[in-house]
Image (spheres, grey):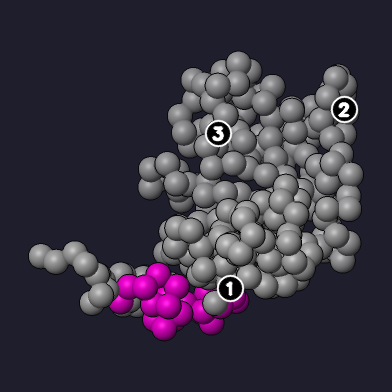
């Protein structure tokens, strides 16, 4: 991994799947090398759409997504694959390949789809598997692995691209508590130790606040607040984001409080 600093930014990004129905509205967002940034918000707030715009898979209808000051959409797919990696929400367990073979697929941007891996490719893949603790089941089929194991393989595959930026879409949504912690610890280590700009879409405010360097709260396609957890983890911001009453509960020795939601007084559900 290069030690150079990289910045992925959304500059007043707007997007609509249908005319007159905006999903993103003038979003300004930034992910930096050496920092784990979590995108948070309710269902339908625009998190995944923003992630797809950041990846260059969707073209903004307004504004631009920039990587180191250059538009992401102007880069060739092969170049972009060397700079940015994506980890989906659900690992493609249907692949009829071993974990090691899946990880090596991350080298396609360097070797070409039909290129045979060389010594450097094998070394990069091994280092990625070592970091993600997946070497122990390198020869097992992806479909035989647990959800947590498969997700770590997909993160290793992303790292094997040697990207400047890694984007993850709810990587812990189907995992147990132990594996959720492992993935968040891994993302933080990836951001701080490699170092890489790591951007993660999450629904777990407490895990995100514990591990992330920055949080960004979305509601109705807008960023309501963004910054370090100590600055933005506030009852008023959380209430506006999720439309529920919020209690912040001290959780020593951590300086970051736990978020506890209460049903909104406007909730149609009664006892």
Q: Earlier in the sequence, mark 3 or mark 1?
A: 3
> Which one is earlier in the sequence, the residue at label 2 or at label 3?
3
Q: Is residue 235 magenta?
A: yes
User: In the image shown, does 154 or 78 lie closer to the viewer?
Assistant: 78
Check disc 2 and report the residue beneath it: 112
Can see residue 4?
no
- Who is closer to the viewer here, 163 or 11? 11
How many other residues sit within 10 Å of disc 1, few (<14), some (14-19) or many (≥20)? many
- Residue at x 64%, y 60% (from the top left corner): 19
Q: Quadrant of residue 265?
A: bottom left
Residue at 38% over, 43% down = 176
The residue to which callout 1 is attached is 223
How many circles with numbers are drawn on the protein?
A: 3
Please name the residue that numbered disc 3 is placed on.
91
> In x, y percent, where is residue 244?
32, 73
244 and 268: which is toward the camera:
268
Horizontal side, residue 270 vs residue 235: left or right: left
| Circle 1/circle 2 CB separation < 8 Å | no
The image position of residue 78, as x and y in percent, is: 87, 39
- Image-based side of 146 in relation to 3, left or right: left
**Does any portion of residue 244 appear in the rendered image?**
yes
Task: Single out the residue that lies furthest toward the front.
Answer: 19
Measure the alpha-carbon separation of dots 2 and 3.
22 Å
- In the rendered image, the vertical position of residue 157 relative to residue 204, given as above or below: above
Element at label 1 = strand
The mark lying in front, picked from 1 and 2, is 1
């Amino acid at each position: 991994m290069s030690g150079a600093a990289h910045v992925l930014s959304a500059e007043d990004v707007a997007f609509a799947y249908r005319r007159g129905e905006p999903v993103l509205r003038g979003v300004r967002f930034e992910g930096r090398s050496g920092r784990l940034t979590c995108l948070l918000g309710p269902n339908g707030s625009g998190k995944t759409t923003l992630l797809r715009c950041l990846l260059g898979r969707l073209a903004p209808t307004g504004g631009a997504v920039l990587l180191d000051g250059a538009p992401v959409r102007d880069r060739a797919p092969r170049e972009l694959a060397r700079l940015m990696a994506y980890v989906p929400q659900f690992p493609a367990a249907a692949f009829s390949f071993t974990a090691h073979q899946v990880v090596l697929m991350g080298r396609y941007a360097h070797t070409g789809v039909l290129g045979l891996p060389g010594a450097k490719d094998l070394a990069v893949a091994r280092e990625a598997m070592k970091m993600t603790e997946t070497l122990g089941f390198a020869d097992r089929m992806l479909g035989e692995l647990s959800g947590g194991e498969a997700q770590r393989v997909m993160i290793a595959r992303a790292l094997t691209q040697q990207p400047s930026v890694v984007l993850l879409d709810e990587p812990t949504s189907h995992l147990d508590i132990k594996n959720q912690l492992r993935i968040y610890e891994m993302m933080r280590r990836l951001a701080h130790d490699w170092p890489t700009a790591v951007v993660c879409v999450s629904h777990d405010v407490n895990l995100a606040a514990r591990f992330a360097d920055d949080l960004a709260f979305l509601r109705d396609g807008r960023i309501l607040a963004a910054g370090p957890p100590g600055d933005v983890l506030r009852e008023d911001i959380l209430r506006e984001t999720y439309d529920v009453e919020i209690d912040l509960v001290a959780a020593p020795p951590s300086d970051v409080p736990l978020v506890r939601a209460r049903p909104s007084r406007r909730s149609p559900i009664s006892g």
